[in-house]
């Protein structure tokens, strides 16, 4: 009788998780893969990276069609309202996730931004952008000014800008729209959103919008802004040539300035809290699980999110390599926060940003925030460039938003 040979073992596919991300975040995820492999040597990770805008468009399509859904998706803060309100994200409250137990481990406003309209967590924060004022020390000195002339109030900031322009010819800021963007975030009431209240009540005719439009119009009237768009070539050249005296942005901007926007201006810049004791956030990143992704892989997806968002070593590594300011409070006492920043003339500015992060208040997100940004920005242009009355501009914006609010 012929001897029988054993049948070859059938190859089994290794489990694979996919995470969809955008530049910078993709590098952070890749840097975490060695640690993931130690924890889950049998599970591969596929990082699907697209440019920022393309990524969020693709995620919108994936959630609405349930096609090409990743197991984990990274989301930028400005898109979070649209995603968290649509029901496409997994609710992370209760078993098996219990994300509500993580609340005290994060900067308060960042955790709150990851909640849906029912107050349930649907996204976990990883990095944040504490707002800061960056200013050219040399231009202030040539104008006979100190930083304390810029920071007492927003009105003082504008007046200091007029003195800088008269003494040096430099503009106070790139575009007056940036001033509006901060001031509408100042004085938001409890349980309010930026543009909408709890029941989608439109808030754009409130005093904070009137003040924001008034001061932005004053900056434009006095020719204190360069009228250039952020991230444009003209914007970058303004920094390189000393034509822009200040920048209002998130703490991450220092890394952008040092690495590619204006590296030759190293040592000329300093950081301060925003004028008028204003504390706001500029962006941030969150991780979420699509509700309709493969249920069998959701426990692993949650393990990946926990690793990326809760491991202090990985969080600090991302801060050091990508300027991703951590939302995780367990990192905030690390010696890295006390190190001097060469681009800021040796200033220990991370201490400043850490304080700001803890003083930023929560703001309710709304699915129509991005649309409201466009509407309000257009009406401010009408005020600054075409002389439209502020009250009429805000009333027109309110009418558009009221029609869109509950879609």
Image (cartoon, helix red, strand yellow):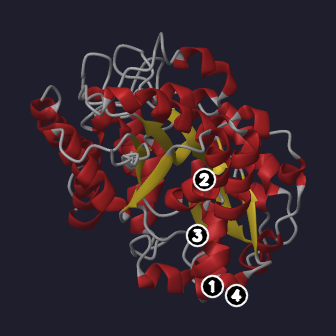
* Residue 304, horizontal then vertical, whole percent: 54, 38
Residue 237 falls left or right of residue 21: right
> How much space separates mark 2 and mark 1, taking CA atoms?
41 Å
Whether 311 is drawn above or below 116: the answer is: below
Q: Nearer the viewer, residue 162 or 322?
A: 322
| 280 lies left or right of 314 | left
Most foreground residue, 297 or 47 = 297
Rendered-image quadrant of the N terminus? top left
Q: How many marks?
A: 4
Q: Residue at x 47, y 10 (%)?
A: 94
Secondary structure found at label 2:
helix
In the displayed structure, 37 sits above or below 292; it is: below
Q: Which residue is mark 3?
A: 162
Q: Are marks 4 and 1 in contact (CB under 8 Å)?
A: no
Choose the circle earlier in sequence order: 2 or 3. Answer: 2
- Of labels 4 and 1, the one closer to you: 4
Name the residue that disc number 2 marks: 33
The one of 361 and 115 positioned closer to us in this rendering: 115
Say whether disc 3 or disc 1 marks the residue closer to the N-terminus.
3
**Mark 3–mark 4 CB contact (< 8 Å):** no
Number of the front mark, 2 or 1: 2
* Mark 4 lies on residue: 264
Q: Give the quadrant of the C terminus.
A: top left
SS of the residue under disc 4? helix
| Mark 1 Cα shell of 10 Å, populated few (<14), some (14-19), many (≥20) | some
């Amino acid at each position: 009788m012929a001897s029988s040979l054993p049948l070859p073992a059938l190859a089994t596919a290794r489990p694979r998780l996919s995470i969809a991300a955008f530049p910078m975040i993709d590098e952070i995820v890749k840097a975490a893969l060695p640690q993931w492999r130690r924890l889950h040597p049998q599970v591969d990770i596929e990082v699907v990276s697209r440019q920022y805008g393309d990524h969020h468009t693709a995620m919108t399509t994936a959630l609405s069609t349930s096609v090409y859904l990743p197991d984990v998706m990274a989301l930028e803060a400005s898109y979070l309202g649209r995603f968290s309100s649509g029901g496409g994200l997994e609710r992370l409250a209760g078993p098996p996730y219990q994300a509500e137990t993580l609340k005290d481990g994060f900067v308060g406003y960042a955790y709150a931004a990851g909640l849906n309209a029912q107050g349930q967590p649907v996204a976990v924060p990883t990095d944040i952008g504490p707002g800061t004022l960056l200013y050219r020390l040399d231009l202030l000195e040539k104008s006979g000014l100190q930083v304390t002339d810029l920071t007492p109030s927003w009105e003082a900031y504008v007046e200091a800008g007029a003195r800088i322009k008269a003494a040096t010819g430099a503009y106070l800021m790139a575009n007056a729209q940036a001033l509006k963007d901060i001031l509408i975030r100042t004085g938001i009431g409890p349980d309010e959103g930026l543009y909408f209240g709890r029941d989608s009540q439109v808030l754009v005719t409130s005093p904070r919008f009137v003040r924001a439009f008034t001061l932005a119009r004053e900056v434009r009237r006095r020719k204190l802004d360069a009228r250039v768009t952020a991230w444009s070539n003209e914007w970058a050249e303004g920094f390189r040539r000393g034509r822009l005296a200040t920048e209002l942005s998130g703490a991450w901007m220092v890394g952008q300035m040092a690495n590619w926007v204006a590296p030759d201006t190293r040592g000329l810049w300093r950081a301060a809290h925003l004028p008028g004791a204003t504390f706001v956030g500029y962006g941030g990143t969150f991780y979420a699980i699509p509700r309709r992704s493969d249920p069998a892989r959701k426990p692993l997806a949650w393990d990946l999110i926990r690793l990326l968002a809760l491991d202090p070593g990985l969080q600090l590594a991302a801060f050091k390599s990508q300027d991703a300011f951590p939302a995780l409070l367990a990192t905030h006492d690390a010696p890295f926060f006390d190190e001097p920043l060469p681009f800021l003339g040796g200033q220990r500015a991370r201490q400043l940003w850490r304080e700001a992060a803890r003083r930023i208040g929560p703001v309710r997100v709304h699915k129509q925030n991005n649309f409201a940004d466009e509407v309000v920005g257009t009406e401010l242009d009408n005020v600054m460039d075409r002389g439209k009355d502020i009250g009429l501009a805000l009333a027109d914006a309110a009418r558009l938003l009221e029609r869109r609010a509950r879609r």
